[in-house]
Amino acid sequence: MTQTPLRVSTHPLYLIDLAGDRPMLACPACRTWLVVADGMLPPHRSDHQPDQAERDKTAPRRPRCVASRRPVVLDLSPSTWSSKFAIGVRDAGMRRGNRVFADPRSESSPQVPVPTPVFRLRRA
Ligand SMILES: [Zn+2]
């Protein structure tokens, strides 16, 4: 069964990890993190629950994920990915409240010029 190749550049940045030696990405179908091997997603089962650290071993194994062996086109270089990802992280950080919590010390004790230490005073 042939599947349409997954172009990494069209995959959400936060579901890609190109920082390591081997490219990793979260499966578009089941969100399982997979190492891209031989230009494709390795065969895997879609029994991964993102909110569950470990699979329920008593449950019957689910069939293979539909995205198993889906070809992956790595059309995003690690440097491009990391810079784009860094911008995304920065934007996410900027979405937080912009209230500034001033250091109360700086308000109650405004900057006073520090006198020159005695040992620095030159003798005339
Ligand atoms: Zn999958």
Image (cartoon, rainbow, N blue to C red):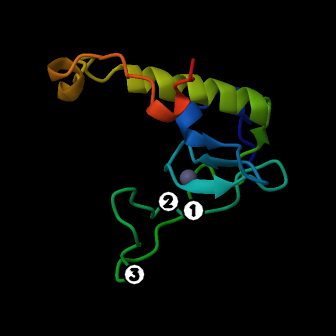
Q: Which secondary structure, mark 2? A: loop
The image shows residue 118 at horizontal and vertical percentages of: 45, 31
The image shows residue 115 at horizontal and vertical percentages of: 39, 22
Image point (73%, 52%), residue name: 20
According to the image, label 2 marks what residue?
46
- Is 17 drawn above or below residue 85 in the view shown? below
Task: Decide: few, some or many residues near mark 3? Use Cα within 10 Å; few <14, some 14-19, many ≥20.
Answer: few
- Is 68 drawn above or below residue 7 in the view shown? below
Is 124 displayed left or right of 19 in the figure?
Answer: left
The image shows residue 114 at horizontal and vertical percentages of: 37, 22
- Is 65 drawn above or below residue 90 in the view shown? below
Position of the C terminus, as image quadrant, is top right
Task: Decide: few, some or many residues near mark 2? Use Cα within 10 Å; few <14, some 14-19, many ≥20.
Answer: some
Asked if ligand 1 lies within 8 A of label 3, the reply is no
**Mark 2 vs 1, N-terminal side:** 2
Residue 103 found in image quarter: top left
Is 30 displayed left or right of 53 in the figure?
Answer: right
Q: Which callout, 3 or 1, points to the residue nearer the camera? A: 3
